[in-house]
Amino acid sequence: MNPVPARIRPMTSADLDRVMAIAGSLQDAPHWPLAAYQAALHPQSVPRRIALAAEDAVAGGVVGFAVASVVGPQADLETIAVAAEGQRRGVGAGLLAALVEELKLAQVDEVLLEVRASNGQALAFYRRRGFSQTGRRPRYYADPVEDALLLARRLD
């Protein structure tokens, strides 16, 4: 498939309906309530969050998004999700690259995340981008109950 030309930009409240629809359409995406996304956009949120949207540069509309929380020199990649039409077309890679740049500007030197142990596609995606496994959280996920693998990447 050809790459989707996507413009990565800060997420806005106008994006939230589409963000909720994308998350709801993906089995492995967190299904946050609207209030959680609204909080991620609030400039005084604690912890501070960086929320980005990937907008299809040709067709328009949000095709993916990412949210990370920043706590000191570390960040937690809370979610990254790409609509079915943008998957395997460079949208996720573009979102992660832009997020890493934003995190560097925020003086973050390490990104952490959890991923379902069975999510081979996500594990391969993160490993190709320099993440390595640092631990395991038994029975971290529900519906279905499953372990989480802890991954980390230095941003030096």
Image (tube, rainbow, N blue to C red):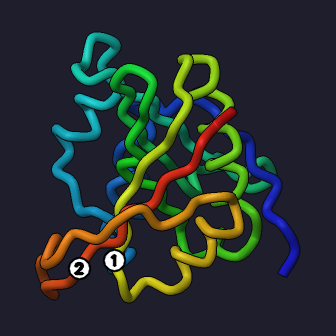
Which residue is identified by label 2?
147
Residue lying furthest right: 2
Q: Residue 87 location in percent, x, y?
A: 64, 73
Residue lying furthest top: 44
Question: Does 36 sit left or right of 2 as displayed?
Answer: left
> Callout 2, which amino acid?
Asp
Q: Is the C terminus in the top left, top right, bottom left or bottom right quadrant?
A: top right
Q: Is the N terminus in the top left, top right, bottom left or bottom right quadrant?
A: bottom right
Q: In this view, does 16 lie above or below 87?
A: above
Task: Mark 2 and mark 1 in contact? Answer it, CB < 8 Å.
Answer: yes
Q: Is residue 65 above or below residue 42?
A: below
Label 2: state its secondary structure. strand
Residue at (48% x, 61% y) in the render: 81
Q: Is residue 55 above or below residue 72?
A: below
Q: In which quarter of the image is residue 119?
A: bottom left
> Callout 1, which amino acid?
Arg
Q: In the depicted view, which residue is nearer to us: 60 or 19?
A: 19
Q: Is residue 58 above or below residue 132?
A: above
Task: Determine crowd level at label 2: few under 14, some 14-19, many 20+ residues with C-alpha closer than 10 A.
Answer: some
Q: Residue 71 location in percent, x, y?
A: 34, 25
Q: In the depicted view, which residue is nearer to us: 64 or 15?
A: 64
Label 1: state its secondary structure. strand
Task: Determine crowd level at label 1: few under 14, some 14-19, many 20+ residues with C-alpha closer than 10 A.
Answer: many
Residue at (38% x, 75% y) in the render: 26
Question: Does 114 sit left or right of 60 as displayed?
Answer: left
Q: In the depicted view, which residue is nearer to us: 67 or 15?
A: 67
Question: Does 61 sit left or right of 147 as displayed?
Answer: right
Q: Residue 141 location in percent, x, y?
A: 17, 74
Which residue is identified by label 1?
116
Residue at (34% x, 66% y) in the render: 135
Residue at (30% x, 19% y) in the render: 42
